[in-house]
Image: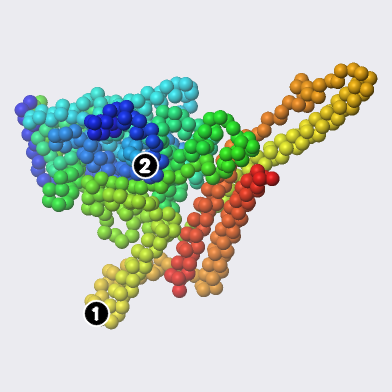
Amino acid sequence: MAGGNTVLHLPSGPTGLVGKLHPTVLFNICDSYIRRNDQQERVIGTLLGSVSADGTVDIRNSYAVPHNESSDQVAVDIDYHRTMFDLHQRVSPKEVIIGWYSTGAGVSGSDALIQEFYGRGEVTNPVHLTVDTSFADERTSIKAYVSTNLTLGDRQLAAQFHEIQLDLRMIEAERIGFDVLKKTMVDKLPNDLEGLEGTIERLHIMIETVFRYVDDVVEGRVAPDNTIGRYLADTMAAVPRVAPDAFDKLFNDGVQDVLLVLYLANLTRTQLTLAEKLNTAAQIV
Amino acid sequence: MADSTAPPVRSFAQAAATEETVVPLRVVQIDGLVVLKIVKHCKECMPALVTGQLLGLDIGSILEVTNCFPFPSRGGEEEDEVEADGANYQLEMMRCLREVNVDNNTVGWYQSTYMGSYQTVELIETFLNYQENIKRCVCIIYDPLRSSQGIVALKALRLTDAFMELYRTENFKGEKLREKNMTWTDIFEEIPVKISNSSLVSAVMTELETDAPATQCDFDRLVLSTNPFMEKNLEFLIECMDDLGMEQQKFQYYYRNLSRQQGQQQAWLQKRRAENMARRASGEEPLPEEDSNNPLFKPIPEPSRLDSYLITNQVNNYCNQINGFAAQSLSKIYLMDALHE
């Protein structure tokens, strides 16, 4: 099958497929790349997730698969791939194989073979995700492809890879906070108040920016932009209009509720400490 | 393993000997990957509580957690079967992970919790199970509900050595606890958590960070409707208080029984003494004052204080949560006020 190795990489517009990539997968890929064997150029692995009816591919999980690669052939550890998949299935049966990933930029010759291997399994059209870990042009490129086979009669000639649109689902990562995930070392997790403080600070800066912009427009320093104006008006409209009296009542009620609960909690804590003291005092008597 | 990296001059025995001088565990260093995996697993299985294993390395006073894998949730199958199955799963998973060069030392486990209600006897049992094989292990507790408030609710816990010793000897009598000077705060110890990321991950994340000034985390934090969370917290607190009251009643019952028994013993002794006096007067051998066969002298078992200790811990935990949360709510309300003006 000499023709099977050829890769026709024709730049084509986005296909109907959309890939949604969860950050866990990205972290996993980076980790497996760091832990690759000596002299191994790249790592490959299986992507797990689900495909919805409208063609959205949700890439939710992944695991690395050991493989061997020489100039014109690849050997993927199929047993390993099978066992790992079975193990993952037991935890989350909804996640099925949807494709595979490899590190490195773009598609290379042997990828067609791996693609074919994954295509023989549960999925008819596996997704191929590439993550460029070399930072060659000082930025990382994460791309996803699907392939179509070019056949002549029964003979398979080549696999054509189409790039698909890839959305990064960073919500989970954002929930934890980029501050935590971006740095190589975080000494302490922010607690309730510290986190809120940061958020309020950011909010403050944003309001400040808007203020400055509005002032500038009013004083004629910046040409007014209708779209921004509309956005601002919408934002203002989103704030519910509450009469001052009603707001005062709401505000006071809220504060009092919280204070009461706070008082209760502190009272309980004091009781606990007191009980503790009595317990130790009993020992002296 | 760790020993192979040691300089060759030191023999294995020496290395092992130096290991003996145990450095106390100070920091748990968790990989960003592990955090994400835990969050993913716990969130997906909500509201079921799930567990998983932590893999990593134990270096001096730092315990590095570099990977983890989830345990399948238990179905309604036979218990033995599930256990054997679980062990198989674990072994297989670790073998597989080793093949891709992941650290395969177990360093503990993680579990999700509902509003921080994790202080149970089961947790302690699991801890002791782990502790038998691994000297240093931690339990990472993740609270998905609290996390939806914009906090990373991750906690690393372990049992204190003193408590473990006491638990092994099953000694939870008031006397013994006082002797050891052990209070409810001494059961668990929280270890500070550090999060580390590889440079590669750090680079990728910096690249991918959105330019938007506000992130999901910020939105979560600014949500004003705090009541449901607060209510749940209070509800649990009240439940705990009820439990604590029950425990107290148990103790009261015990003490009442004890004092009644002592009274009866005294009465019996006096009767016996009077009898002896009479016997001595008539020249007969006195009866012994101790009678172990008498049901009056059978000691009443003292109820274990473990439960009340755990509940106290739990109550304290809820109070802390409420405190932190109330402070947050207050700031939010004042922020609202300022915005409104």
Q: Which mark is residue B41?
A: none
Q: Could you say whether the residue bearing mark 2 is in a helix, strand or loop?
A: loop
Which chain does the residue under circle 2 lie in?
B
Q: Residue furthest left?
A: A2
Residue A57 visible somewhere in the drawing: no
- Quarter of the image with the N terminus of chain A in it: top left
Q: Residue furthest right?
A: B282
Disc 1: which residue: A221
Mark 1 crowdedness (10 Å alpha carbons): few <14, some 14-19, many ≥20: few
Which chain does the residue under circle 1 lie in?
A
* Residue at image location 28% in from the left, 78% down from the top: A216
Judge by depth and name the residue closer to the eye, B223 or B1: B1
Tell if the residue under mark 2 belongs to the same chain as the one under mark 1.
Answer: no
Residue B271 image-quadrant placement = top right
Measure how far apart labels 2 and 1 are at the Cα level. 59 Å
Q: Amino acid at mark 2?
A: Ser
Residue A195 image-quadrant placement = bottom left
Q: Amino acid at mark 1?
A: Arg
Q: Is residue B20 left or right of residue A183?
A: right
Q: Is residue B336 left or right of residue B100?
A: right
Q: Could you say whether the residue bearing mark 1 is in a helix, strand or loop?
A: loop
Q: Position of residue B248 (x, y in %)?
A: 67, 41
Q: Position of residue B293 (x, y in %)?
A: 76, 20
* Residue at image location 41% in from the left, 28% down from the top: B133
Q: Is residue B337 left or right of residue B88?
A: right
Q: Position of residue B264 (x, y in %)?
A: 81, 31
User: Is label 2 in contact with label 1 (beta carbons under 8 Å)?
Assistant: no
Q: Is residue A193 above or below residue A249?
A: above
